[in-house]
Image (spheres, helix red, strand yellow):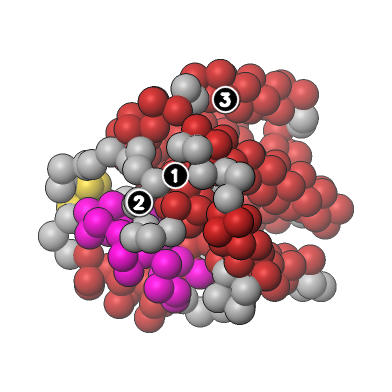
Amino acid sequence: MLKVIPRKITMPIPELGSNSLVKNNPVLSHFFNALSTLFPIGEAFFIASVKPFINNIKDEVLRKSAIDFIEQEKNHSYVHTILNRGLEKYNMKVRYKNQEFRTKKALRFYSSEFNLALTAGMEHLTATIGYVIIRGNYLNNVHVQVADLFYWHSLEELEHKSVVFNLFQEVDGTQWKLNLGMIIGSFMTYITTLSRMVHFLHKDGLLFRFATFKEILNLHISQEGILRKCLPLTIDFFKPNFHPDQRDDFELIADMENKLKGIFIVKEA
């Protein structure tokens, strides 16, 4: 398990809201916009699922990592809340309320152990997206400040990718719960992201165009499509004896951290 290091952003945080976030690609622009809208409430769910177990963690290294995981997630939620202010013109309040309602319902409806399994699965998904973003060129034509924030978020997702997985193994360890949590989490993330992306494109008057349909298809099936790149890495979760640390991301994280120096400060231990 990698050391989890909370990094607080020090540079000014811009706002999203443009269909030209990625130059000449409104579909990919609104994919990232939609993804960003999921984070504040999603991070709140992750934090709420981990907190009940913090004081009972036997492994001190894991306990410290879980505390720092929560700190990282708080920072992510704060940054994306500001980024998302520019999306208010798309009348997102109803969708935010629906997501918040579903999140609170899940926390009440499912057991604490299953919420942890759900979080473990979704943390694998966010780490997968982060890995694909860092390894790809999807943000090459994005405003440097926005790109840096997505890279910062991605590197921290890679860094803490095994924390909740390890915590679940200590607390419960039931494989079917992990698998079901991954299925539910992946499905809800995909549907919500896609529906919000479509909503943004519709509001911009771009939805019913052949070029838009083509780019949405490219997200899914083209060789460099971000969703196609994510799929095999996501499915790895279901392999026997899978563990997030089986892929070593240390050098990738170190390289990205070095590139981003100057936009954050590291919280003192």
Q: Residue at x 35, y 51 (%)?
A: 20
In the picture, residue 67 is in which quadrant? top left
Q: Secondary structure at mark 3?
A: helix
Residue on which the image places disc 1:
33
Alpha carbon separation for disc pair 3 and 1: 14 Å
> Measured along the vertical axis of the image, is residue 51 above or below residue 263?
above
Residue 174 x, y percent position in the rendering: 82, 52
> Magenta region: which residues?
132-154
What numbered label is drawn on residue 139? none
Give the label on residue 95, or none: 3
Do the residues under discs 2 and 1 have CB atoms within 8 angstroms?
no
Residue 130 in sight in this render: yes
Q: Nearer the viewer, residue 187 or 122?
A: 187
How much space separates mark 2 and mark 1, taking CA atoms? 11 Å
The three-letter amino acid code for the residue at tag 2 is Ser
Q: Helix or strand or loop: what does disc 1 sit on?
A: helix
Disc 3 crowd rating (10 Å Cα; few below 14, some 14-19, many 20+) is few
Judging by the rendered image, the residue that carries numbered circle 2 is 20
Disc 2, SS: loop
Q: Name the spot of residue 112 as percent of width and height, x first.
A: 71, 33
Look at 16% across and 43% down and name the residue there: 12
- Residue shown at the point (22%, 65%) measured from the top left: 260
